[in-house]
Amino acid sequence: MRRIHVIGIGAGDPDQLTLQAVKALRDTEVFFILDKGEVKADLVRLRRDILGAHLPEGTYRTVEARDPERDRTAEGAGYSPAVGEWRSARAGVIERLIAEELGEDGTGAFLVWGDPSLYDSTLGVLEEILERGAVAFAYDVVPGISSVSSLAARHRTGLNRVARPVQITTGRRLAEGLPEGVDDVVVMLDAHQTFQRYADSGEDIDIYWGAYLGTPDEILASGPLAETAPRIVALRAEARARKGWIMDTYLLRRRRPGDDGGPGDDGTPGDKGGPGDECGPGSG
Ligand SMILES: C[S@@+](CC[C@H](N)C(=O)[O-])C[C@H]1O[C@@H](n2cnc3c(N)ncnc32)[C@H](O)[C@@H]1O
């Protein structure tokens, strides 16, 4: 039976690979790499560097394919069907790769950015391929360090406050409003800097923002949203122009009267100094 490892590789820093991930790499003969086009060439390179750093040359193969294009014009009710169609197109490409490139008892792997459980289609695509029934395999999942964990670590803050919930969502969802009953919201996949909508809301909100986390280009900014939002917009525009693409994530933290400002899940002291630190672009 063919076997497949779905390996979370962290969100940019090669040192974020876990020992379990390294073991899974060493157990793999064929790595499937989907190229998302020039803009993401850096990310493909990072995957190659990870393999080079942990595996002796000549002990594995990489197989590349072009990721199908997604219809990025689809909005509103058309958004989910467009994502569904793209996922099926991806399933077609990957099904062919597995059938053609992996022997009946071979072991392959997908290196997934961050953690496979967060906003990633690999697990859904593999399930779709198994449902189609044309190719059979067993698969397992190795967790990775998500960009969300990286963001919290770099800002030295928790994601939730004492006994309170935290929500992870997308820029698209945030555009519909801040969620009810949740004061800590992590936002991913936001090409439109949706945080700006809440900068003048009159609510007491802090932002903890990070771009290219874990890479030499990492940029961090944090502080009260009203005054930090324009700074992030400027940092983001400059970085995007320089590199041609950007990946950023942020935590919005709504303050309520009586909050001590510190995160924690058990009463341990948090980031007492509050937000306000900022690092410029790194050496890369
Ligand atoms: C398709 S999702 C994949 C998330 C990934 N599975 C994870 O666990 O981080 C891509 C989004 O993750 C966030 N992201 C991933 N890597 C990042 C990084 N190094 N720095 C900042 N944000 C990152 C961005 O919000 C980006 O739009």
Image (cartoon, rainbow, N blue to C red):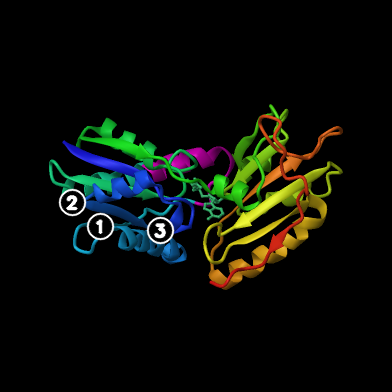
User: Callout 1, which amino acid?
Assistant: Val
- Which quarter shows the N terminus? top left
User: Callout 3, which amino acid?
Assistant: Lys
**Going by the image, does 151 lie left or right of 259?**
left
Residue 112 placement (x, y as % from top left): 40, 48
Q: Main secondary structure of the magenta part?
A: helix
Measure how far apart labels 2 and 1 are at the Cα level.
Answer: 8 Å
Q: Residues within 10 Å of mark 3 (few under 14, many from 20)?
A: some
Q: Looking at the image, is mark 2 or mark 1 earlier in the sequence?
A: 1
Q: Which mark is residue 63?
A: 1
Q: Residues within 10 Å of mark 2 (few under 14, many from 20)?
A: some
Considering only vertical position in the picture, is 249 above or below 162? below
Magenta segment: 72-87
Q: Which residue is mark 3?
A: 36
Residue 104 placement (x, y as % from top left): 12, 41
Residue 84 placement (x, y as % from top left): 43, 39
Nearer to the camera, 57 or 224? 57
Quick check: marks 2 and 1 in contact, CB under 8 Å? yes
Q: Ligand 1 near label 2 (Cβ, under 8 Å)?
A: no
**Going by the image, does 36 lie left or right of 157?**
left
Quick check: marks 3 and 1 in contact, CB under 8 Å? no
Q: Which residue is mark 2?
A: 101
Asked whether residue 89 is in view, the answer is no
Q: Is residue 74 magenta?
A: yes
Q: Looking at the image, is mark 3 or mark 1 earlier in the sequence?
A: 3
